[in-house]
Image: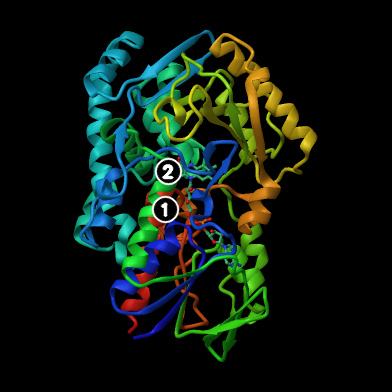
Amino acid sequence: MSKIAIIGSGFAGLSAAAILAQAGHQVDVYEKHQQLGGRARQFEAQGFKFDMGPSWYWMPEIFEQFYRKFGKKASDFYELVRLEPSYEVIFEGETIKVPSKLEDLYKLFEEIEPGSASKLKAFLDEAKYKYQAGMNTYVWKPGHSWFEYLDKEVISSFFKLQMLSSVSSQVRKLFSDPRLIKILEFPVLFLGAKPSNTPALYTLMNYADMGLGTWYPIGGMHEIIKAFVSICKDQGVKFHTNKEVKTIHTQNDVASSIEFADGKSAALDYIISGADYHHTEQDLLSSTARNYSESYWQNRKMAPSSLLFYLGLNKRIPNLKHHTLFFDADFDIHADEIYNSHEWPSDPLFYVCCPSQTDDTIAPEGFENMFLLMPISTELEDSQEKQEEYYQRMLSRLNKHVGFDINSNVVYKRAFSIDDFKSEYHSFKGNAYGLANTLYQTGPLKPKLRNKRITNLVYAGQLTVPGPGVPPSIISGQLAANEILSNL
Ligand SMILES: Cc1cc2nc3c(=O)[nH]c(=O)nc-3n(C[C@H](O)[C@H](O)[C@H](O)COP(=O)(O)OP(=O)(O)OC[C@H]3O[C@@H](n4cnc5c(N)ncnc54)[C@H](O)[C@@H]3O)c2cc1C
């Protein structure tokens, strides 16, 4: 039995912990916060329960796959409901509801652009193929070297997976209506890069969206964290909260102990860091023990940060859906301001999540629980004035959509932005979703799972393989655990 320390209790840390404890090891998870869950934490205020990060439950099979390893299923922990419509998109002067049923979706496309239903069908068939190849094969590669990808199946699928083309060019080849293009390019925003810089392999996200559906666990996304923690505890994992790691001590090429902010320390045989990769390397390790230099990090393309407002309203909003995308602005200009010119957006796209439309357990009766999210560059200088300016701008567009001024109904408001991502999660540049999934930051080109100098140190989470998002983080934790298990 080895003594294994895990830093961070996000999805990556929790999934690694459960797998290693199940294999018979003594596993301790150290988390700087009082609450477990990392970016998927939840806080309570004035009778509201706010999920702080993820809100889209996509790829339900990845969750089930994990639960099955422990003889469980999602329904043992929470009630999952499929949303109808999946989401609503606001364009200038009109609103489109994206239906959950494929037949309805084909009808919608055909009405908007005659001839597009059959193209969508072919596009989704291809996306399904990519999803199956991507999620069954690619994402499970640890990314140590290109040789992992040299099996017959992967090579024969390489051209079909369109790694060298972009999501944007694939979509625009088939569809010309700007609203359909926006709907089909939207899912790759989860991957933190522009559709024109995201390999066409990732149209697999369209199959996840339209083929597999948008789901929601009653009680909020934090219910998933509770499920993972319960599995970990069943396997004997010990949790230590309010326990911030300050240093990973190494001797020769081995990590020997970790030291905490309270001055205490713990010995270990193996360590997985599920904290942000850059923080682990630059803040916790000595310079001779790092995989990457600061200039390496400065040259990475980061996924955006976010300006968020958690709002509690003392009134129901009848015509608001669970997920609403405000695409009534120029997508390309906003993307350029996030990824290239690094400016505060001139006319932002944003997203409103109102889970109390589906779930009456997260707000007092007759009240509404929502958050506003605006993606922003990680290079911006955060300030309360800027936050308030964009709050008012988002609110005025939301008011227009719902048909009344909600300002006087806001009974709870909390902002969360770049500086909070930095201080709460030690997030590099305040990123919300890790590293952008561009071609040059995919697979073996991502920061490596293993520390090449310290033999018993492994990284996990959204900055290493396979990438950002809840399902990839769950997979990342399992890949990191396998690195240790295959070493024993
Ligand atoms: C606003 C927002 C919306 C999102 N929406 C979605 C969505 O709808 N769907 C989706 O699939 N994904 C979404 N994501 C992405 C998803 O939430 C993340 O990719 C995933 O949760 C990352 O998990 P992780 O385990 O890699 O990291 P984290 O969740 O960040 O976990 C890292 C943990 O390490 C802890 N830590 C850091 N430093 C130390 C230290 N020195 N000592 C001890 N502990 C430490 C942190 O406190 C944290 O708990 C969203 C993210 C954000 C921020």
Q: How many marks?
A: 2
| Residue at the image point whose x is 70% and y is 46% from the top | 379
Amino acid residing under circle 2: Met
Amino acid residing under circle 1: Ile
- The residue that mark 1 highlights is 225
- The residue that mark 2 highlights is 221
Image colouring? rainbow
The spot of residue 199 in percent (x, y) is 41, 43
The spot of residue 412 in percent (x, y) is 64, 32
What separation in Å lies between label 2 and label 1 (alpha carbons)?
8 Å
The spot of residue 75 in percent (x, y) is 25, 45
The spot of residue 52 in percent (x, y) is 54, 43
Find out if the beta carbon at label 1 lies less than 8 Å from the nearest ligand 1 atom.
no
Find out if the beta carbon at label 2 lies less than 8 Å from the nearest ligand 1 atom.
yes
The residue nearer to you, when weighing 435 against 5, is: 5
Toward the bottom, the furthest residue is 252
| Residue at the image point whose x is 64% and y is 21% from the top | 395
